[in-house]
Image: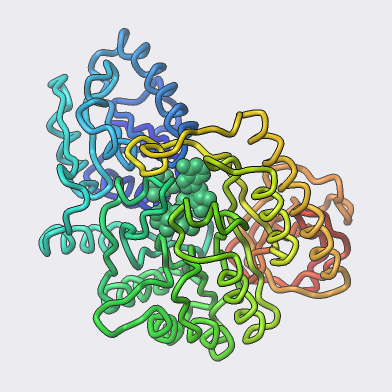
């Protein structure tokens, strides 16, 4: 049986996709890159913005068409959109199986049952905000431990989930309704998993959680976890995403200083610079409180790289509110920012209570403007790297050919990332993928550093 896979969404989904793929491989399925050869199509979905769901729906439209000539094809939709739409998604002609993110350990069995039967089935949480049973958490933990693998992702890199779900209920956000309540995984399970990955050649782990700094297992905090993970021989870099800018435990910054393995990189979304909008977003902090956290970060870790997220065009965002986001970006001096146009999500408080009253043209314009403001800052910061030598973990050959090719093309251009998440392009042999290399930076653009390996 051949499986074709498509995955949408964040790192959390990428990790789920890896786990699911490995569970299918172990059960005897083979992967195919050719849709026409597939017996089973797996689609991991995202609901965070309408656009993400539209992309899934257009794929399902194509699959419906293919099923006309191949009615035996089994289509399983899993992840956040599956949980959000539940049975409604099952009524789509193309779909055989709808499986929520907390039910992924069951997916292989569901598919096996559907093969040759043309049946439909659903496995989702009926009440997603209900805390998972001990048994379900255990099952998810075991699934995670059994099916994570060093071969997924980029060479020598792995994601490791430290917590599930989210309890913050930002008014615009669907995540708490599709991923369920916040739950931290037991530290011993996380550590055992990372040791296993390290034995298999992993050098960098990225600890994942929607609000990773809120991690706590009984009295064991996220900072404690950093100290424990640091003890694992062979793990050289530890990164983590995403941080929530409230109740920030300063010991996390101290860990960055104490522990050379902990990368000095902080992804800490502000979402807006306007207190009025932050309140309407239910973020629970003011712009000043946010700035105090990043000031503290820089006081303790002067060379920390900070990245952010912003939403433009949230209901009620005036030009003045927007200007405050521009000002915040200027003050914060982010290394880079992800900027999103507000997208109303059914079932969220913002969608229930607030009209989506900023016209799309204005959203687009604000998006472009914020990107331009951030672009200038990123370009300036990147220039300061010129002449310096930075250590990068090599990801592999660069997808596109860069005009800034410095050396004559003896080698492919490689792409790597620094511990502070800067993208570095340089020439070198392909077998450097998964290795640490020192690169002397010669040139810089807003998004990329270009250099020459000093080895
Ligand atoms: N848990 C993380 C990330 C959540 S989703 C955090 O809180 O930082 C990633 C990003 O998508 C968010 O930071 C936010 O900027 C954006 N986002 C979430 N819901 C959105 C919506 N309804 N419309 C537009 N952007 C949204
Ligand atoms: Fe969504 Fe807010 Fe939770 Fe992030 S913290 S996942 S934006 S509800
Ligand atoms: Fe991630 Fe999208 Fe779900 S951002 S948590 S895959 S809604």
Decide if residue 237 is on the left or right side of residue 140: right
Q: Quadrant of residue 346?
A: top left
Q: Residue at x 69, y 82 (%)?
A: 302
Relative to 316, say whether 22 is above or below.
Answer: below
Q: Quadrant of residue 446?
A: bottom right
Q: Residue at x 86, y 50 (%)?
A: 404
Look at the image and tell me in which quarter the N terminus lies. top left
Nearer-the-camera pick, 424 or 156: 424
Nearer-the-camera pick, 309 or 14: 309
Residue at far top of view: 68
Look at the image and tell me in which quarter the C terminus lies. bottom right
Q: Residue 410: x, y in percent?
A: 82, 53
Can residue 13 be seen from the camera position used here?
no
* Colour scheme in use: rainbow
Looking at the rendered structure, the number of numbered marks drawn on it comes to 0
Q: Residue 324: x, y in percent?
A: 68, 55
Residue at far bottom of view: 258
Q: Residue 261: x, y in percent?
A: 54, 81
Q: Residue at x 70, y 59 (%)?
A: 329
Can residue 7 be seen from the camera position used here?
yes
Q: Residue 137: x, y in percent?
A: 18, 61
Decide if residue 260 is on the left or right side of residue 430: left
Nearer-the-camera pick, 353 or 389: 353
């Amino acid at each position: 049986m051949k499986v074709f896979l498509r995955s949408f969404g964040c790192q959390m989904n990428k990790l789920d996709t890896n786990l699911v793929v490995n569970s299918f491989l172990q059960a005897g399925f083979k992967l195919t890159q050719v849709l026409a050869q597939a017996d089973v199509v797996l689609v991991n979905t995202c609901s965070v913005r309408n656009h993400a769901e539209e992309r899934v729906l257009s794929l399902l439209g194509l699959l419906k068409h293919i099923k006309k000539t191949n009615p035996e094809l089994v289509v399983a939709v899993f992840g956040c959109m599956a949980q959000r739409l539940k049975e409604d998604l099952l009524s789509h002609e193309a779909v055989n199986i709808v499986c929520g993110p907390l039910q992924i350990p069951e997916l292989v069995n569901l598919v096996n049952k559907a093969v040759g039967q043309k049946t439909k089935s659903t496995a989702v949480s009926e009440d997603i905000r209900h805390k998972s049973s001990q048994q379900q958490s255990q099952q998810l933990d075991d699934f995670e431990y059994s099916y994570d693998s060093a071969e997924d992702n980029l060479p020598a890199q792995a994601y490791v989930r430290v917590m599930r779900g989210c309890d913050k209920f930002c008014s615009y956000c669907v995540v708490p309704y599709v991923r369920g309540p916040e739950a931290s995984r037991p530290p011993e399970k996380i550590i055992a998993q990372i040791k296993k990955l390290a034995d298999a050649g992993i050098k960098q782990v990225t600890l994942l959680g929607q609000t990773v700094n809120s991690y706590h297992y009984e009295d064991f905090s996220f900072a404690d976890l950093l100290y424990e993970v640091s003890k694992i021989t062979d793990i050289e870099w530890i990164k983590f995403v995403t941080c929530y800018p409230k109740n920030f435990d300063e010991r996390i910054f101290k860990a960055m200083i104490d522990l050379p393995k902990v990368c000095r990189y902080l992804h800490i979304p502000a979402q807006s610079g306007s207190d009025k909008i932050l309140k309407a977003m239910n973020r629970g902090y003011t712009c000043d409180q946010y700035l105090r956290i990043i000031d503290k970060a820089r006081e303790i870790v002067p060379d920390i790289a900070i990245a952010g997220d912003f939403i433009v065009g949230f209901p009620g965002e005036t030009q003045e509110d927007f200007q405050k986001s521009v000002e915040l970006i200027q003050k914060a001096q982010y290394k880079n920012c992800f900027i999103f146009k507000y997208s109303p999500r059914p079932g969220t408080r913002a969608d229930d209570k607030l009209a989506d009253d900023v016209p799309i043209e204005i959203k687009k314009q604000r998006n472009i403007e914020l990107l331009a403001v951030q672009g200038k800052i990123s370009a300036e910061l990147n220039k300061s790297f010129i002449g310096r030598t930075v250590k990068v973990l090599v990801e592999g050959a660069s997808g596109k050919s860069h005009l800034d090719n410095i050396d004559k093309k003896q080698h492919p251009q490689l792409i790597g990332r620094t511990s502070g998440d800067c993208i570095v392009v340089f020439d070198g042999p392909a077998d450097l993928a998964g290795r640490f290399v020192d690169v002397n930076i010669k040139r810089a653009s807003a998004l990329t550093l270009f250099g020459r390996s000093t080895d």
